[in-house]
Image (cartoon, rainbow, N blue to C red):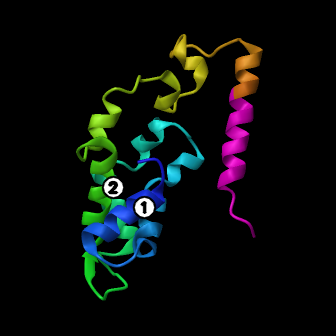
Amino acid sequence: MAHAYHHAVSSARRFRGTAEDYLAIHEWIDGSKVAFSDHRHRALRHHSFGVYACEERFGKTIKNSDGIDVPVRTIAEQHIVEDLGYVPSVQDWFKHMNKEFWMTGRPLTEQFNPKKKSNDKSAQKHNAHTRGLIQESLRIPT
């Protein structure tokens, strides 16, 4: 489905109530479109762990406008099945992801020779700059 609102309408048909009862859940599931606007955004929340995270965020159930308690897990699973046909695991998504050296967390200079420090001044400058940015982001304001 193209928009969270259409998922919410589908939820209202299935569980009763109004689309507005379900819209926040469907917007959250599709919220990764802000960072990545094509179908690959689904890798961030359209899986079994995303269902769990949705339940953690919205609670085990919501009460719709007809007074019916509806399980959040079922709403999230409905959304994902409408988009993908089933609820994949995180592993289903990530097993197709290429492993990149930077994902290891080691300095980029180790990519070429892990036992020897690089004499490449630009790589050293880049690594120092990156470390500085990370340290700055972790600083707690006093």
Tell me which corner region of the image, top left, top right, bottom left or bottom right, holds residue 12: bottom left
Query: Bounds of the magenta span?
Result: 127-142
**Secondary structure at numbered mark 1:** helix
- Pinpoint residue 74: horizontal percent, then vertical percent: 24, 64
Type of amino acid at the residue the image marks with label 2: His
Looking at the image, residue 86 lies above or below residue 138: above
Residue identified by numbered label 1: 26
In magenta segment, residue 140: yes
Query: How many residues crowd around disc 2 within 10 Å: few (fewer than 14), some, or many (20 or more)?
Result: many
Q: CA distance from mark 1 to mark 2?
A: 7 Å
Work out whether mark 1 precedes mark 2 in sequence or the reverse, and give the earlier one.
1
Residue 126 left/right relative to 63: right
Q: Residue at x 32, y 66 (%)?
A: 11
- Pinpoint residue 53: horizontal percent, then vertical percent: 36, 61
Tell me which corner region of the image, top left, top right, bottom left or bottom right, holds residue 88: top left
Residue identified by numbered label 2: 79
Q: Nearer the viewer, residue 76 or 55?
A: 76
**Secondary structure at numbered mark 2:** helix
In magenta segment, residue 61: no
Q: Residue at x 51, y 33 (%)?
A: 105
Looking at the image, residue 48 lies above or below residue 73: above
